[in-house]
Image (cartoon, rainbow, N blue to C red):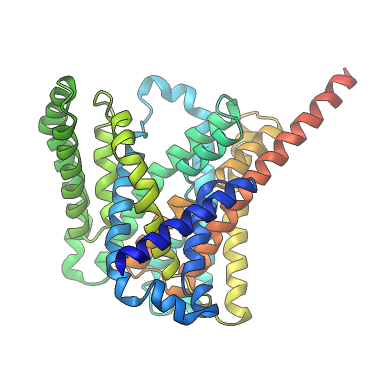
């Protein structure tokens, strides 16, 4: 039965993703909707017997493991595309760096404020510091993979403002993952004083060990295998490295996704690794593993956990804080650097794309027991709304710029 249920999940995600593309959205929006439709929020309420047949509780563990594998491989792939700017490029990175800084700091501070305000109502049994910090990080992240897809779909790959937003989002994601690792360490320490030293020093030891192992042994070996075009041996080593690294971070009380990101960043310069990775794993990852992750996220999103107008009010507050904070921070930074209002608004609109990265962050919060089910549901909806709004907003800004150009020319 599990294989039949897996086929249903894949088909639902493909169908909803195709519909999203047809109506002008990016595919990930439809895939998120598919997970929600298959979960208890829609199918479980409308057809409970069918829901128990399609996605019963007995398959939850299997979906969880497949979804976690998908997230781990995706985070490694994202790491392959992350390059921290070197000293020579820092001088020219002022605009994206300031956009990243304010675009992260403003929604992070607003999210922490909303979390502190709402904790007594929404999360009275969750440690205060972990909950407040996590909500701030969750509202502050962007999503480079979703933004790349939106930019490509709209033909903006060579647009200077799109390149600025992508560079800023990459910096935001790196900083956000560092902050999230800190929050996870704090959460581990709050569950017991005996874990305090491990929670604080463990990530430092892991990073040092991972960097040493990759630089001294793994990267030279992969370079030799790539030169001989021995792809099976190369990817056996790559996959084992990612899995062992992910296991190490999970044993430290962090999420396995943390352990996949760093090897990707360290191995990005292995010759042709990114191209061969996409050819070998890209299709399976996007066709099978990621739909499973989205459906598993949908299984944990349940509208009945958000009860009454009082809790829905908090969803509106989270949405306003995250959207206005991200747009306002990014827009303000762009204006401080001298961009015109239209260009600054385009950057701010793109920075509000969250989608996949937000779901990964939220799944980590749920597994670490930082987010109650009601808050998780609110923030998944928040990710869906802000991501769905990105493409229409970007199109609106582009149309506004096109209208403003003839007006400016006529005045001259």
Q: Is residue 219 left or right of residue 344?
A: left
* Residue occupying image coordinates x 14% and y 26%: 225
Q: Is residue 167 left or right of residue 186?
A: right
* Residue occupying image coordinates x 42% and y 70%: 300
Residue 257 in the image: state x and y as whole percent.
Answer: 29, 52
Q: Is residue 23 visible?
A: yes
Q: Is residue 325 visible?
A: no
In the displayed structure, would residue 280 be above or below residue 367?
above
Say which quadrant the C terminus sits in: top right
Residue 5 in the image: state x and y as whole percent.
Answer: 37, 66
Say which quadrant the N terminus sits in: bottom left
Q: Residue furthest top?
A: 412
Q: Nearer the viewer, residue 183 or 62?
A: 62
Q: Is residue 319 left or right of residue 76?
A: right
Residue 77 in the image: state x and y as whole percent.
Answer: 33, 40
In the displayed structure, would residue 175 be above or below residue 181?
above
* Residue occupying image coordinates x 21% and y 72%: 192
Residue 115 in the image: state x and y as whole percent.
Answer: 49, 67
């Amino acid at each position: 039965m599990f294989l039949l249920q897996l086929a249903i999940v894949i088909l639902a995600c493909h169908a909803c993703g195709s519909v999203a593309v047809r109506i002008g959205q990016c595919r990930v929006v439809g895939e998120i909707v598919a997970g929600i439709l298959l979960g208890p929020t829609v199918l479980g309420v409308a057809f409970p017997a069918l829901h128990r047949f399609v996605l019963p509780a007995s398959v939850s563990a299997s979906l969880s493991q497949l979804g976690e594998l998908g997230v781990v491989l995706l985070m490694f792939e994202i790491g392959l595309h992350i390059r921290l700017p070197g000293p020579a490029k820092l001088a020219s990175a002022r605009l994206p760096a300031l956009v990243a800084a304010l675009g992260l700091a403003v929604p992070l501070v607003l999210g922490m404020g909303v979390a502190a305000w709402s904790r007594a109502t929404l999360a009275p049994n969750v440690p205060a510091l972990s909950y407040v910090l996590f909500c701030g990080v969750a509202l502050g992240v962007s999503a480079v993979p979703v933004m790349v897809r939106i930019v490509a779909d709209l033909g903006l790959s060579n647009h200077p403002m799109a390149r600025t937003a992508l560079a800023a989002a990459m910096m935001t994601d790196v900083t956000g993952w560092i902050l999230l690792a800190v929050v996870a360490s704090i959460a581990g320490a709050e569950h017991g004083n005996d874990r305090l030293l491990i929670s604080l020093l463990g990530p430092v030891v892991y990073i040092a060990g991972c960097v040493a192992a990759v630089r001294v042994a793994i990267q030279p070996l992969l370079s030799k295998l790539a030169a001989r075009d021995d792809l099976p041996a190369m990817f056996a080593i790559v996959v084992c490295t990612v899995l062992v690294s992910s296991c190490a971070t999970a044993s430290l009380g962090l999420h396995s996704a943390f352990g996949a990101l760093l090897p990707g960043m360290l191995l990005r310069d292995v010759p042709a690794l990114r191209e061969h990775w996409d050819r070998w794993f890209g299709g399976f990852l996007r066709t099978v593993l990621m739909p499973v992750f989205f459906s598993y996220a949908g299984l944990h999103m349940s509208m009945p956990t958000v009860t009454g107008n009082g809790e829905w009010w908090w969803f509106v507050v989270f949405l306003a804080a995250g959207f206005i904070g991200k747009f306002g921070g990014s827009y303000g930074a762009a204006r401080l650097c001298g961009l015109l209002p239209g260009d600054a608004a385009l950057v701010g609109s793109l920075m509000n794309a969250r989608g996949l990265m937000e779901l990964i962050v939220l799944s980590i919060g749920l597994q670490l027991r930082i987010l109650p089910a009601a808050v998780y549901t609110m923030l998944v909806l928040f990710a869906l709304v802000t991501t769905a709004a990105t493409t229409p907003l970007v199109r609106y800004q582009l149309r506004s710029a096109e209208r403003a150009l003839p007006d400016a020319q006529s005045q001259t």
